[in-house]
Amino acid sequence: MTILRTIESGLKEIFAQIDDIALNNQKKVLDAFRSNNVALRHFAPTTGYGYDDIGRECLGRVFASALNAEAAIVSPLLVSGTHAISTVLFGLLRPNNIMLSISGAPYDTLNDVIKGKNVGSLDEFGIGYREVGLTNNGFDKANIETNLTDNNVKVVYIQRSRGYNWRNALSVGDIGDIIKFVKSKRKDVIFVVDNCYGEFVEELEPTAVGADIIVGSLIKNIGAGIAPTGGYIAGKKCYVDVISYRLTAPSIGVEVGSYAADYRPFFEGLFLAPRVTANALKGAQMFAETFRTFGYDAIPSKNCAVSDIVCSIKFGDKSKLIDFCRAVQTASPIDSNLLLEPWDMPGYNEQVIMASGSFVQGSSIELSADAPIKEPYIAYVQGGLTYEHIFIALTEIISKLNLTL
């Protein structure tokens, strides 16, 4: 406890910056609610086709306003971030088009979406894929420019968060700079940003600096642990409309889609998201600084601007990694008694161990940790609905792992 208070004291300036960002984002979200006249009637459930579902329609407008977008799809029909991204890619790309990822390989669960065999992947529809890795200085502009000379490149894709890579997340400023560069070479390409883990971490979203489409999951930052499921797609209306035809059907788009439960959690989750995200950001800093104190490599660094809610801790040892994830599970409010084991999780290249004792299954805005079982055995920690839970969990994890100076 004493050591955590000392670490906490050293992070006061960073915590104050996080609180300032949360304040500005809360004002932005509040304004989105007020400008769209959100009322109790918008929480009411619908059934069947969901024609004239005012809750669904209002929710999309509020998200669009809060995310600096022209339009948004916010739907429980989007079962995950991967599903939302897949819907975007299949909505925008056509045979002979090329998807160009300029932040290296996307998250593991997109592998089959892009090039899987006998699963209806982009590759099987004649849609090409290329990637340009990041360099130590950020985006590889020379290589990106070379790829843009191929007129078949239609979507330029960025993954904002680190995924299972040892790097910091990409800042909105960095994303804005590369969008400006790419658009100076090819105005016709569509810029898509995987915004998972990044919502409300900074005062601006990628849509404010030129991104055409951003995509995310409602069981991460923007749902605040309240939204029970779902995903969002936001950006320019012309692209959101085309994507909506892939979500349902070309003759339907977002004119239908009912939800027989209460829409309130989606609205309330968005409203609480700036503060909950701030709590998670403080948690990332606390986990990183604590484990550095005990001799482990960890990011974010203390003096580095943070652009997602994730903390990466390099254990260098399989058993230590597994023990850490098990300790996170025991510090959780739900299923704290489970003994975690690595398993063949759908969509991943290696076995994965995942600690998620959460109220919403798999919610990674709640305190959670996951890791592929591969060298150098890095754990990726994220979330925490309350800072108090994060602090208590860290105290128990230190004790359970017998960490000493």
Image (spheres, rainbow, N blue to C red):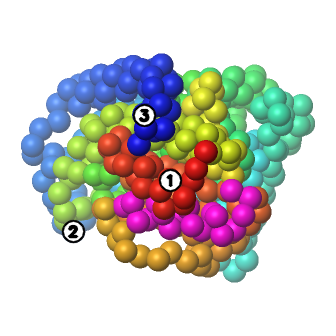
| Residue, disc 1 | 398
Q: Position of residue 331 (x, y in %)?
A: 39, 60
Mark 2 lies on residue: 48
Q: Position of residue 162 (x, y in %)?
A: 65, 46
Q: Is residue 77 visible?
A: no
Residue 331 sits inside the magenta stretch: yes
Left or right of 45: which side holds 71? right
- In which quadrant of the rendered image does the N terminus lie? top left
Q: Find residue 228 and report its horizontal and vertical position in percent.
A: 30, 59
Towards the viewer: 257 or 168: 168
Part of the protein shown in magenta: 315-332
Disc 3 residue crowd, few under 14, some 14–19, many 20+, Cα 10 Å: few
The amino acid at mark 2 is: Gly
Marking on residue 5: 3
Q: Earlier in the sequence, mark 3 or mark 1?
A: 3
Q: Main secondary structure of the magenta part?
A: helix
**Residue type for callout 1:** Ile
Front residue of 385 and 116: 385
Task: Estimate how packed mark 2 is, as few (under 14), some (14 to 19) or many (20 or more) residues with alpha carbons within 10 Å.
Answer: few
> Residue 1's mark?
none
